[in-house]
Amino acid sequence: MKNVILSDISLREGSKSTNHVLSFREKVEMLKLLERTGVNAIELPSIKNVKTDGLFLKMAVDILANSTMVCQLELNEQNIEDTWHCVNSAKNVVLQIAVPTSVVQMEYFCHKKPPQVLEMTAQLIKKVKEYCPNVEFVAIDATRSDSEFLKQMIEAAIASGSSQITVCDSAGMMMPDEMAKFIDDLYQAIPALSQVNLGVEIYSKLNMAEACAFTALSKGAIVLKTMANSHEYPNLDYMVHLLAEKGDRYGLATNIKTTELTRSVSKLANLQQTQRNTKSPFDFGVSNDKSNVTFDKNDDLNAIAQATIKLGYELSEEDNARVYEAFANIASKKDFVSSRELEAIIASTALQVPATYKIDNYVINSGNLITSTATVCLQKNGELLQGISLGDGPIDASFLAIEKITGHHYELEDFQIQSVTEGREAMGSALVKLRYNGKIYAGTGISTDIIGSSIRAYVSALNKIAYEEDNR
């Protein structure tokens, strides 16, 4: 019985989507859910931005305890070094070189002739092998490639150190009998292929991806690229079901438990198929503090500094000292300080900067019969700037109006609101965390109007970003 290796490409392909852009937190949540499915490998997109994408890869290292991490690489040596720097402590990691092998795609994506692509691929795989023992070569558009050139590319990849070869039906036009012949021909033409893992990636233009995938596995492939809740690639849930029902007949099996798979795939659907406004600052709505972590007067400066790092902040020694001083003052008066309170301390004491933006006025219109609108006016260097926007609610509209003023979309990492006093003139406190270039900037605001406190908190965090940008 042969155990099939299921490699999920949901995150890799999700990074290319233009219909629904995944936020940083959504990527992290998807990663955790995919790990719970029990899938053998999880493929991650290549680094485009060293700070933000690199941070995600580093978080992935801590999250993935069982699934192998597969990191796609850009076709240059600097990207290889940057990626390895982020994932070198991973428990199980594969670095992936994906190169087109059809003439049309080689010229379009690589701007090179076949002999140059062959040489480039061999050199890159050798470079990757210097860092990581597990290297995967992916032949993009393999089924439409010249058979002799595809043979040369696979042989060169194996000779250069690849331990896994994946062939792609990128057009998705093959029928099961054509796929069977294609796999048979590869094994016959390339004897060395039997010494490595052969994988298949099949696009489902004809809705035949699962049938072709099962055929490829029955002919000797062992790795299958799948995607949760997908109609474009072999569906993860369906392939596990198919292997459970028909695998014995062909000597194929999977170790994935269907109960946990079904539960996790259902949750993944909510992240993958959400059709809300992709430009909205909101990704997860208002945050409720569910953390059980607390701190007390016995926690020293180092413990609080480590806690701020776990919360996602990168503070200077001076800011850490300010945060600890404020924490110690509060901790001396109560039994414990929650992580939510610590974040409020960080927002109100760390990186206090001159105000680049000042609130002049705002007008909010909202109701159950109209779409929420916000008009926000901010002052910057004596100039009055105005932003007007629609939103999914009054606070969403307010944040979008501020983005109109700044001309930049900041990812809303977290948003918390709470009452700090009681009575008719009760004050509301808001905490806003914005992620920019891989760092978190937090701001707080207090007002009798919760919308006003939210706007103040957003502008507070925005001023910290603007200050760092101006002083680089």
Image (tube, helix red, strand yellow):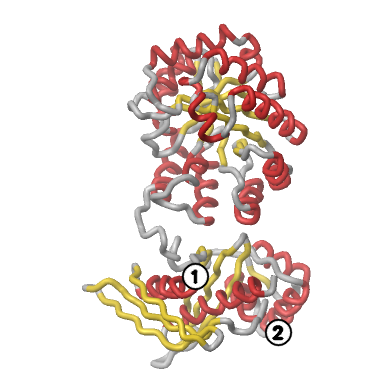
Give the answer, above or below, for where 121 lies relative to 178. Answer: below
- Picture layout, residue 309 above or below residue 353: above
Looking at the image, tell me whether mark 1 or mark 2 is earlier in sequence order: 2
- As drawn, is 366 to the left or to the right of 264? left
Residue 375 appears left or right of 199: left
Q: Quadrant of the C terminus?
A: bottom right
Whole-percent x and y of residue 349? 66, 80
As drawn, is 370 to the left or to the right of 362? left
Q: Which of 466 and 212 is in front in this view?
A: 466
Mark 1 — residue? 415
- Work out which residue is located at the far left of the displayed protein and give it: 369
- Residue 300 position, x and y percent, is 77, 72
Q: Which mark is residue 329?
A: 2
What crowding class fits label 1: few (fewer than 14 Cα within 10 Å), some (14-19), or many (20 or more)?
many
Residue 298 position in % (x across, y down)? 75, 74
Of the pair 377 and 133, the residue shown nearer to us: 377
**Callout 2 crowding tier (Cα within 10 Å): few <14, some 14–19, many ≥20:** few
Image height of 38 relative to 334, above or below? above
Seen at 45% across and 43% down, the residue is 264
Count of numbered badges drawn on the protein? 2
Quarter of the image for residue 323 reads bottom right
Q: Which amino acid does label 1 sit on?
A: Phe
The mark closer to the camera, 1 or 2, is 1
Q: Horizontal and vertical percent for residue 445?
A: 52, 82
Residue 256 marker = none
* Residue type marked 2: Asn
